[in-house]
């Protein structure tokens, strides 16, 4: 087993990567498919799953990439595997329950949830880079960024958004707005 890489390319202690393609029978799979498994110690405080063996968390993925070292392929897979995060974000945004009675009304509700999740992802990518807020969950974003203590003020034919002086996230909000609308 090869040592597993961290996100920044450094070797991580307590984690390993191995290829299982030659050890398992894959009838019906497309030619060139590879099965790669990683074993790691779960983070302190993480709840163990029933699939964890000997204190190691095992996860596997299949790829048709024929070239590349195992740690590099595993690192690429972890960097691209954001689907579960987006599903969790959509559930936290309102997809967990369909509140309306009719099919068409719930279809519109789902479209609104998808739009909100997409806007949140783009805001985190474009406006919040370089800050921990890029990884915040929707509940924290709502509390700190989407519902600030502020008021709209109109003066000299201009409308301004004035934040309360005590609001701790004012600088982050104004920086994000400046990144989204630099003009």
Image (cartoon, rainbow, N blue to C red):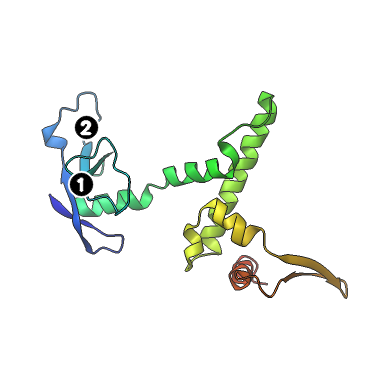
Q: On residue 66, which mark appears?
A: none
Q: Position of residue 114 (x, y in %)?
A: 59, 42
Along the horizontal axis of the image, is 65 left or right of 142? left
Q: Quadrant of the C terminus?
A: bottom right
Asked whether the residues under the numbered discs 2 and 1 touch, taking CB atoms below 8 Å apart as contact, a structural biologist would say no
Secondary structure at badge 2 equals loop
Task: Please tell me which residue is depicted at 60% across the width and 61% down the height of the picture.
Answer: 144
Q: Which residue is mark 1?
A: 39
Q: Is residue 66 visible?
A: no
Secondary structure at badge 1 equals strand
Q: Which residue is mark 2?
A: 31
Q: Quadrant of residue 5?
A: bottom left
Task: Please tell me which residue is depicted at 70% across the width and 65% down the height of the picture.
Answer: 149
Q: Is residue 34 above or below residue 174?
A: above
Task: Please tell me which residue is depicted at 61% across the width and 55% down the height of the picture.
Answer: 142
Among the two numbered marks 2 and 1 on one chain, the one whose residue lies closer to the N terminus: 2
Task: Please tell me which residue is depicted at 29% across the width and 42% down the height of the picture.
Answer: 48
* Discs 2/1, front: 1
Q: Position of residue 81 (x, y in %)?
A: 37, 47
């Amino acid at each position: 087993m090869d040592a597993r890489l961290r996100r920044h390319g450094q070797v991580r202690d307590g984690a390993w990567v191995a290829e299982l393609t030659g050890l398992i029978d894959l009838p019906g799979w497309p030619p060139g498919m590879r099965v790669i498994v990683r074993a790691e110690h779960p983070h302190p405080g993480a709840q163990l799953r029933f699939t964890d063996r000997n204190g190691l968390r095992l996860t596997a993925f299949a790829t048709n990439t024929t070239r590349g070292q195992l740690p590099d392929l595993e690192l690429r897979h972890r960097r691209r595997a954001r689907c579960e995060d987006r599903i969790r974000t959509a559930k936290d945004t309102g997809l967990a329950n369909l509140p309306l009675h009719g099919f068409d009304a719930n279809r519109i509700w789902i479209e609104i949830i998808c739009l909100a999740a997409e806007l949140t992802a783009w805001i985190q990518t474009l406006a919040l880079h370089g800050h921990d807020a890029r990884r915040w969950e929707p509940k924290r974003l709502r509390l700190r960024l989407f519902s600030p203590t502020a008021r709209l003020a109109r003066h000299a034919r201009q409308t301004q958004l004035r934040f309360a002086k005590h609001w701790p996230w004012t600088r982050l909000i104004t920086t994000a707005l400046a990144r989204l609308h630099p003009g």
